[in-house]
Image: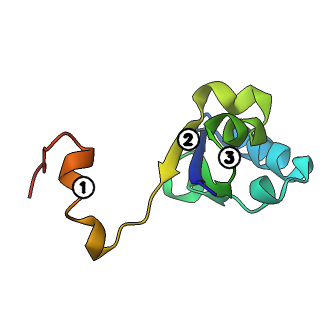
Amino acid sequence: MPRFLIEVEHQPTTAECNRTIAVFLRTGSHFLTHADWGCKDGVHKAWFIAEVDGKDEALSIVPAEYQATTRIVLLTRFTARDLDQIPRRHGGNRGPG
């Protein structure tokens, strides 16, 4: 099943941090109650990983009021055997390095 990194941003105020954390904890969702937060380091976002069928399902986990600013990233693990395939998947551009 695909894995997605879900990044939820909120306003950088103490009140908004507290409110957002409370919303996450009140949902009862395993994903939301186990989110990692960057607030103490000045990055006002929460992150969690979900194994779901697609981006729409991943977004549905997020409380509605945060969905517009949520970023969802499909996660992929690569092995050394994958290295030959990566340039083809990216249009032949190897990029920097």
**59 lies above or below 29:** above
Q: Position of residue 72 (x, y in %)?
A: 55, 41
**13 lies above or below 69:** below
C-alpha gap between disc 2 and disc 3: 13 Å
Query: What amino acid type should be assigned to the residue bearing mark 1?
Result: Ile
Label 1: few (<14), some or many (≥20) within 10 Å? some
**Between residues 69 and 74, which one lies in front from this camera angle?**
74
- Which of pointers 2 and 3 lies earlier in the amino acid sequence? 3
Question: Nearer the viewer's eye, disc 2 or disc 3?
Answer: 3
Badge 3 marks a residue whose secondary structure is loop
**Quadrant of residue 20 within the rendered picture:** top right
C-alpha gap between disc 3 and disc 1: 23 Å
Query: In which quadrant will I find the C terminus?
Result: bottom left
Q: Which residue is mark 2?
A: 72
Query: In which quadrant will I find the N terminus?
Result: bottom right
**In this rendering, position of residue 93 left or right of residue 77:** left
Query: What amino acid type should be assigned to the residue bearing mark 2?
Result: Ile
Residue drawn at x 64%, y 41% is 54
Q: Which residue is mark 3?
A: 53
**In this rendering, position of residue 41 left or right of residue 60:** left
